Image: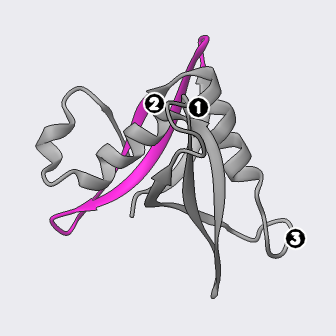
Amino acid sequence: MPEILKACERDGFYFGVVRIVVSQEIAAFEFGVDYAGYNTLRRVFQTRPFSNMPGIEYRYFFTGSYGRKKAAEERATFMVRIEQGDNATSSEFDGPTTLVSNLRWFMKLKDLSDVGPLKRIE
């Protein structure tokens, strides 16, 4: 499952960052999102179903589960697994189809050479 690491804004453009494991290689990539996708990612990171204590790390993973509540609707519903230590749960989020398509693409990636010009994050 792609781990969603970050959402950021830079020079008026919006980005998400995911970490994936492909052929036993771990890599993180930055990808462009629109403003709605950026806001959706921020909502994901604000979801803290367990402890709210500072310094407690949460991890967020796109599960691959997605759909639409209404046919032909632009927004998609997708599931994110949220982990904190030994605790884990899944939450449903609504967001733009473009964001969900990008997350699905990362999940299906079989070779890191297929990422093209995406910026690799160390």
Amino acid type assigned to the residue bearing label 1 in the image? Gly
- Residue 38, compared with residue 62, is above or below; it is above
Residue that appears at 45% across and 30% down: 98
- The magenta segment is 10-31
- Compare marks 3 and 1 and give the one earlier in the sequence: 1
Amino acid type assigned to the residue bearing label 3 in the image? Met
Quarter in which the N terminus is drawn = bottom left
In this figure, which residue is indicated by the disc labeled 1? Answer: 37
Q: Are marks 1 and 2 in contact (CB under 8 Å)?
A: yes
Which residue is outermost to the top? 12
**x and y percentages locating residue 111 in the rendered image:** 12, 51
Query: Which sits in the foreground, 115 or 74?
Result: 74
Is disc 2 placed on a helix, strand or loop? helix
Residue that appears at 84% across and 75% down: 51
In this figure, which residue is indicated by the disc labeled 3? Answer: 53
- Residue 113, compared with residue 36, is above or below; it is below
> Mark 3, mark 1: which one is toward the viewer?
1
Residue that appears at 54% across and 28% down: 74
Q: Locate residue 24: give its quadrant.
A: bottom left
Q: Locate residue 55: give its quadrant.
A: bottom right
In this figure, which residue is indicated by the disc labeled 2? Answer: 98
Is disc 3 placed on a helix, strand or loop? loop
Query: Which sits in the foreground, 97 or 55?
Result: 97
- Compare marks 3 and 2 and give the one earlier in the sequence: 3
Amino acid type assigned to the residue bearing label 2 in the image? Thr
